[in-house]
Image (spheres, helix red, strand yellow):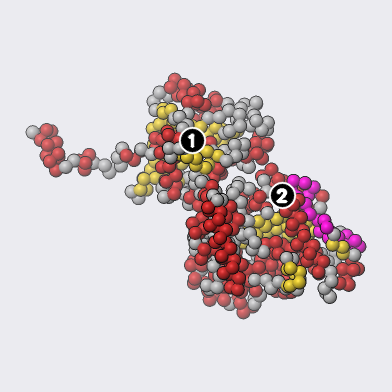
Amino acid sequence: MEKYNFVGIENIKDALKGEKRRYKRYLDKYSDYGTQYAFDVLFSNKYVTGRDTQLACFRHLQDLGRQRDSDFPYEYDTNYVDAIEYFARNIPDPTDTSILVDPMPWQSFILDSLIGWRDKNTGGTRFHTAYISIARQQGKTWISSILVNFYYFVVGWNATAQDFLIASYDSEHAKKLFDYVALQANVITKLDEFRVESKERGVDVQSRQVIGKNNKNTIRTGSSQGGGFDSNHNLIAIYDEFGNMEHKYDESINQIISGQSKIANRLFIAISTAYPNVKVKFKKDQDLTRKIIEQDYDRAADDTFMIIYKQDSENEVYEPETWEKSNPLLGLQDVREQLLGGLLTLRDKQEREGELASFANKSMNIWSRKFQNSYLSLENIQKNIIDDFDIYGRDVYIGFDGSQSNDNTSFGFIFPYREVKSDKYFCKQFSFIPFAQAKTIEAKEKQDGLNYRELEKQGLCEITRSPEGTIDKDQVYHWLEKFVADNDLKVKMIALDPNLSDWLLKRIENYHDEWPVSTVRPTSQVLSNPTKDLQAQFINGNAAILNDPLLIDGFTNAVLIEDRGGAVKIDRLNRTSDHIDTSDALVNAHTGAQFYFEDFKGDDYNPFNDLSRDEKKDYFKRMFG
């Protein structure tokens, strides 16, 4: 089996052009809707799809060939595929129970993958976790209700005392999905295939649950806010609007999943559109799973299914011909014009009202703050991430952003460097984490959505040593001294706001007067030029950062605010949990770094290059007569 690595490759279809003949052989054996869809996505122009969708389809086809490998304990069983397809095509649309729904190929791909892939060792499902993300009003609730009812009326039909969970972050959203399930269940109990057995099991569709009074199989609702997930062992659990779940409720997901651990056919499905907050668990889980799938030889997520229908770029908000990527229902030709017209109207309306960010999140399924006047888009942050950078012996500009009890204290380091005659800037941070206001470091981590103890192990920060949880000034100062000395750094400037950093300024003046210091007032007039210039370096690809969650968090939290004169600086939306200390520190550092290359002379510099012909004659005449 050939190994693939798609990290950094934008167009999956182009990368796989030469594999069409090999994958086409699989269609001779697997004629199901899901496999045909995967092939068509990669090797035809039937569908307009994004990178994440293409990755999911590649993985399916690649794994069909991998079934021959001894270390791959999974198989794609078309008998199970036939079962879910038959079921899905013979129960009603919950929005109109008088009609049946004919699943589109993309919907079949999801259903067939989740039910068709089996574990040879247990006989149960291969996929125990699924991440499904689609733009709003694209039928994600229909997919969820189909799966819940299939598990209730088919998978767990002959068992007793089985739990089935419909969850969300609040009870209102959980109830909405339950209503869809209940409407379908009412019809299913009257179908010829289920009428008699439904009566035997005493299936009763109630306003808050579906319960088998005789076999005790029960579909319940629950919410992270309400808690109580740790007492049930759910055969299937679907969490709706997972992207809006706050970090403080992450433990509720662990409760659900741990309760399923001994069930062969267990399935946990997280389903949602994108949201503005990029720090939530759904976004982090997507990024981690994508990274594994990109490296096809990495088998770490073999029991996790993921498909994301989203735009590949924020710029596509203005390219309606690409919107099928996030809105696969646009593939229905008989309703395409109507659906597209509605999206265009909504886009224009929300743009006029200054709410284009909502359109990007919900209708384009993009995790983005770009349209909230964000300082940097996720796209512009991520494209500048590199694997490593050697800082030893380099020139450095240091910015400092001080704090006391709640905000972090951060150093920002900018290392100017040349790469193929291009002027570039490597940006790095180091932070000190107080917890006085939160009371404990555990509470601080939940509040900020960052695992500071793990980040400390990675060498990206230090938790304050002060027992009271306030910033320890000695700890901060001695760390800086050691960092500069250990890396033999040539300090070009240390820039700081004297209001919160006077103590650091005095120590530098007393003990390191060789370090040039610049005081920076935190006003838009002072910060506007370095703020805009640093932003431009990231947008133009002339910056570089490591994959540092603290630094990335600082950039994604930062928004631009403009004063009456047009000058700008960065600020944050949420003053409790949205920290921009690392960004503030880097902007301070860039007050000096932005001018580095104006006076920079490379190793190949020759002063005579700057002299005219006559000036060179005069120079030699003065020197030698």
Q: Amino acid at mark 2?
A: Tyr
Q: Residue at x 45, y 37 (%)?
A: 564
**Residue 525 vertical position relative to residue 547 in the rendered view, above or below:** above
**Residue occupied by mark 1:** 585
Rendered-image quadrant of the C terminus: top left
Front-lying residue, 99 or 544: 99
Front-lying residue, 303 or 88: 88
**Residue occupied by mark 2:** 169
Distance between the Cα atoms at labels 2 and 1? Answer: 35 Å
Residue 214 painted magenta: yes
Label count reads 2
Q: Amino acid at mark 1?
A: Ala
Q: Are marks 2 and 1 in contact (CB under 8 Å)?
A: no
Measured as percent of width and height from the top left, residue 433 is found at: 59, 33
Front-lying residue, 392 or 426: 426
Residue 573 painted magenta: no
The mark found on residue 44 in the picture is: none
* Outermost left residue: 625
Q: Secondary structure at mark 2?
A: loop
Please give left or right for residue 138 compared with residue 186 in the image. Answer: left
Measured as percent of width and height from the top left, residue 621 is found at: 10, 35
Q: Residue at x 61, y 32 (%)?
A: 406
Q: Residue at x 81, y 59 (%)?
A: 219
* Outermost top residue: 510
Q: Which residues are magenta?
A: 207-230
Q: Secondary structure at mark 1?
A: helix
**Residue 125 vertical position relative to residue 560 in the rendered view, above or below:** below
Q: Residue at x 60, y 73 (%)?
A: 334
